Amino acid sequence: MGTGATPSEFYSTVGTIDTTPVQILKTVAATNIPEALAADGTFFRTATLIAHNDQARTSNTGNVYLGASSVNGQQPVMMTPGSVWNIIAPDGQKYDLNDYYLDVDTAADGVVIEYS
């Protein structure tokens, strides 16, 4: 520690907010029609996306694409089946899952999202 702080002061949680991790599944019904990851107001500080089409660890059939644009073909992050992508907001800020869009090569593919 080296600062003269007691262990309880060093590991203080003053000013922190309790969060409970949430896990959801987002699949896209049709190709070439990007969909928002979640409803408006689904805020997070960190989100991990896993390219699966169900919550039972089944990898997608094709690639999925993530981006901040709802326009078809403008999701620059390609996720291969089973791959993982993390989104982390800067300290003191939060993002909204509704601002991210997912497109798929194969209908009904998607991502499992774990966020808090």
Image (cartoon, helix red, strand yellow):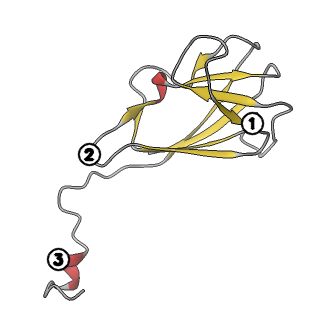
What's the residue type where badge 3 is placed? Glu
Residue plotted at (34% across, 38% down):
94
Q: Name the residue under label 1.
A: 54
> Which secondary structure, mark 2?
loop
- Left or right: 31 as drawn, with respect to 74: right
Rate crowding at label 2 as few (under 14), some (14 to 19) or many (20 or more) other CA atoms within 10 Å: few
In contact (CB < 8 Å): disc 2 and disc 1: no
Q: From the viewer's perspective, is residue 35 above or below residue 26?
A: above
Q: What element carries label 3?
A: helix
Amino acid type indicated by mark 1: Asp
Q: Which of 67 and 13 is in front in this view?
A: 67
Q: Which residue is drawn at 39% across and 33% down?
A: 95
Residues tagged 1 and 3 counted as in contact (Cβ below 8 A): no
Q: Nearer the viewer, mark 2 or mark 1?
A: 2
Relative depth, front residue between 95 and 72? 72
Q: Locate residue 37: give its quadrant.
A: top right
Identify residue for label 3.
9
- Marks 3 and 2, the one that precedes in the sequence: 3
Separation of marks 3 and 2 at Cα, in angstroms: 21 Å
Q: Earlier in the sequence, mark 1 or mark 3?
A: 3
- Taking the image as shown, residue 106 lies to the left or right of residue 104, namely right
Q: Which quadrant is home to the C terminus? A: top left
Badge 2 amino acid:
Gly
- Tell me the residue that label 2 is attached to: 92
Residue in view at x 51 percent, y 23 percent? 68
Most distant residue in the left direction: 4
Count neighbours of disc 3 (C-alpha within 10 A) and say few if under 14, some if 14 to 19, many if 20 or more: few
